[in-house]
């Protein structure tokens, strides 16, 4: 694009160039209007000015990008129970205190402590020829107790596995090789459809007498990064190791198997589960000016997988949650309701932090208006997905015109998130809200060593924090 | 995001998981319905099925990513007049022929031939201390004729320059240091507002007797990449050199100037303009089955700046334009109107290809229904911006429900693009249409050595080609 094309962007952005959106002609007099009035988007003109201030602050003086640089670069991988997870707790508390929230505190919670150790995978072909391939243990897997060498049977579903005769499964590795369905527009949907292989692959393999599960990495990308992620065991079934192969390795293994169904795979993993460790959720609060007993939570998870810096998963959600509160303050807004940023511990392999947060909320008889979670990466904002009744969704959707100038007005039914999910049973918030951003790149790096700070774009990240702050502003002002 | 969060994506994507969109209940009988009928989105249910086929083909068997890998990796930078530009012409023609279009041909056009040569910039401070900083010549600049050393005066606008006394400008470099306005949501708007410095900085500097122009790179990014781009001369004003500084270098120079207003800058640039070269637009056509005389053009520009691989600017637009036609064919669709993919030559520093295409269209008395341009990068699709009358915009916007499942339904007034712009005066198409995709990352790499293949995401790119093919399908079927 040259000089001459400047016009393109000037035209396309004319509305924004003119300043704050001015589509909300009707002014509001009452502090708490009826739902019906709001449903017709009769929000105050001051709201559009407030949102513009929030976005200005984020884009001109945002702090979340530099916070993320520190979290990912100076602390890095921070799996539950690790020393780095504790460093992240200390960092989160200090960062919130520095931001000047009214109250910053920790919630103690016992978390799993799984450690990886060395790991190695090799395809062993004709005449013992060995091809080393990228593998990683799935989170929570047992180790192999030295080298584990066996034949391989490839399947694409549990149904296919069930139909195999015992002789072709027993004593072998079950190799789950169903790829992402690339035709799905949202890669998250493909993740959902392929996820059973990782989650329950080892259980289903062990039921049939297999020695372990090899799982194709959950991604559309074709590369050499194995993707870890949590796996489950069934107390009634023997525990066998579960490992992920990179997609390239999975393709290679599949191809070699076709030529030589008798080939073997040698897996060596030292991973093991240690006793639970004490850890913490980190909570920061701005007290509501009018309805302090009504709480709005915004959060991400502080733990990450051990292979990764945990930039998009979920460092971005953490720094955006802290930033959302900071932006409200910096934009000169004193929230009517209490707003809490929560850095949840142990989302990846247990959700103990989310459960403990909900347990304490119930125990303390807290009133929760809404909870927002950011755990889908820090890419360009699109909108919000709500778990709520229809009237609540309609009310939030009525705010879309205020959010449209920032391209974050895609407000639909959806799912909140793993960490806020337990609040539903515990304290029945009116809405669980998932922050939605562009998702095309997310699963390329998800749970891999490639989930690093350089994959995060400053503006995309700061726009996300501002989007969350804007929704909180509206939730806090109008309630649900 | 863990295992447990699979639900998030399943919920969010439920509509898509269920298959083709089914929101278009009313069927159409007539081949060419009235505008009013279309304005109410009375499109055929077969349209939603056709679009789903196009997207399936792109996501499962798309070829644009591998085409781009070749163009950027095997040919690379391809400024007008360079041997690589000719290689790109040959590649474009061969690629279209391989795709089996009905007709593939070249349009000869003479283009500028500017070459960069060596370049160096140094801040010369107290006691002759030299700090080398990243600079690059702006496209079309004259060289410095050896080392050019002079004082520096910093300004942020032409107004500010005008108010300076002659003595503080004459014999110096004018250093234009107005940054991007980061508060603007679309970075393209910030590009538009900062662009005069690069475009006309040397002219305005020379008018005041300055020896050259140093221009802050047009980007929000803070890094060491200087951004080139075209600059202008005025025949009535002396030609002085124009160079871009990286944003880090601009910040450094500004800071040092505050401490020492007498510092000097030494610039050495060997760039020069050679005689015009013969080059070509590359055109590929699928002939319309019902209205072959009515033409729909889709294009990007084949030339790139010399510093860059020209991945996002505009290799993506080229491969998407070729792919759009291939997708129509592969999805089993025979367009009613003639569809042309055009790889325009010389968009970056002259737009000679776009002008020649329009000139020939007028000469041949062609009827052009619409022209689409992709020159804003290959990121996740958002929609289309139209230069048209209101009724045409309303008609195209009525197709938004068909495009919504693919998140490419943001259809607004906008600007078409530099290469299709000359068609307006030449043959008056009903609409010039700019393809809009996510733009937050574009200007980080625009016109720099960092505009490389690895910045392009496969799915984002293929979704873009499918979006363009879908719009062409509708334009071809229903006309304008």
Image: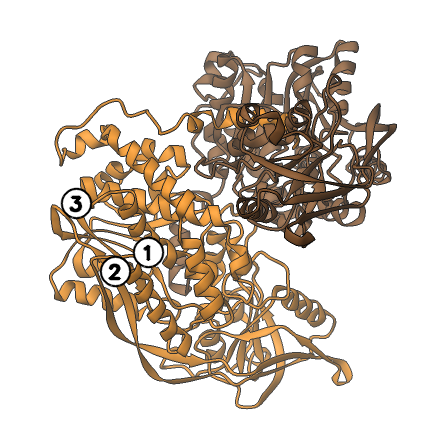
Chain colours: A brown, B orange
**How far apart in space, not on screen, are marks 3 and 1 (Cα)?**
18 Å
Q: Position of residue B128 (x, y in %)?
A: 74, 85
Decide if residue A473 is in sight here: no
Nearer to us in this view, A329 or B277: B277
Q: Is residue A356 above or below residue B392?
A: above
Query: Which numbered disc flags the more N-terminal residue, 2 or 3?
Result: 2
Label 1 Cα crowd, 10 Å radius (few <14 / some 14-19 / many 20+): many
Give the labeled residue for mark 1.
B322
Could you tell me which secondary element the residue under label 1 belongs to? helix
Give the labeled residue for mark 2.
B284
Q: Position of residue B63 (x, y in %)?
A: 40, 53
Whether the residues at callouts 2 and 1 have beta carbons within 8 Å, the answer is yes
Label 2 Cα crowd, 10 Å radius (few <14 / some 14-19 / many 20+): many
Label 3 Cα crowd, 10 Å radius (few <14 / some 14-19 / many 20+): many
Give the labeled residue for mark 3.
B336
Q: Position of residue A323 (x, y in %)?
A: 69, 37
Query: Which numbered disc flags the more N-terminal residue, 2 or 1?
Result: 2
């Amino acid at each position: 694009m040259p000089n001459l094309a400047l016009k393109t962007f000037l035209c396309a952005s004319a509305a924004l160039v003119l300043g704050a959106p001015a589509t909300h002609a009707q002014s509001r007099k009452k502090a708490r209007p009826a739902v019906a009035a709001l449903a017709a988007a009769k929000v105050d003109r001051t709201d559009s000015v407030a949102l513009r201030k929030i976005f200005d602050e984020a884009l001109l003086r945002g702090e979340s990008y530099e916070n993320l640089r520190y979290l990912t670069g100076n602390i890095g991988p921070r799996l539950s129970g690790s020393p780095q997870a504790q460093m992240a707790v200390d960092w989160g508390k200090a960062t919130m205190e520095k931001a000047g929230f009214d109250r910053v505190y920790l919630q103690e919670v016992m978390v799993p402590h799984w450690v990886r150790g060395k790991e190695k995978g090799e395809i062993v072909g004709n005449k013992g020829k060995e091809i080393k391939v990228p593998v990683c243990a799935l989170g929570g897997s047992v180790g192999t107790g030295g080298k584990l060498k066996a034949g391989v049977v490839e399947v694409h579903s549990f149904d296919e596995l069930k139909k195999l005769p015992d002789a072709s499964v027993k004593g072998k590795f079950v190799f789950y090789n169903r790829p992402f369905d690339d035709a799905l527009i949202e890669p998250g949907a493909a993740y959902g459809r392929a996820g059973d292989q990782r989650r329950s692959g080892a259980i289903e393999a062990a039921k049939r007498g297999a020695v372990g599960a090899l799982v194709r990495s959950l991604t559309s990308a074709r590369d050499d990064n194995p993707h870890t992620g949590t796996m489950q065991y069934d107390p009634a079934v023997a525990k066998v190791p579960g490992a992920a192969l990179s997609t390239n390795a999975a393709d290679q293994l599949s191809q070699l198997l076709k030529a030589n169904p008798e080939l073997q795979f040698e897996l060596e993993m030292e991973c093991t589960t240690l006793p639970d460790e004490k850890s913490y959720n980190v909570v920061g609060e701005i007290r509501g000016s009018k309805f302090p007993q009504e709480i709005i939570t915004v959060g991400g998870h502080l733990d990450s997988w051990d292979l990764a810096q945990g930039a998009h998963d979920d460092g971005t959600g953490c720094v955006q949650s802290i930033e959302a509160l900071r932006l409200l303050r910096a934009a000169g807004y004193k929230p009517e309701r209490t707003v809490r940023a929560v850095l949840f511990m142990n989302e990846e392999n247990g959700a103990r932090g989310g459960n403990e947060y909900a347990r304490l909320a119930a125990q303390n008889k807290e009133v929760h208006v809404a909870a927002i979670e950011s755990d889908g990466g820090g890419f360009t904002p699109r909108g919000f997905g709500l778990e709520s009744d229809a009237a609540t969704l309609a009310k939030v959707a009525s705010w879309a015109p205020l959010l449209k100038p920032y391209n974050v007005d895609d407000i639909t039914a959806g799912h909140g998130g793993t960490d806020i999910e337990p609040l539903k049973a515990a304290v029945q918030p009116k809405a669980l809200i998932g922050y939605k951003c562009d998702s095309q790149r997310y699963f390329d790096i998800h749970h891999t060593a490639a989930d690093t700070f350089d994959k995060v774009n400053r503006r995309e990240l700061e726009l996300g924090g501002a989007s969350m702050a804007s929704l909180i502003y509206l939730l806090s002002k109008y309630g649900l």
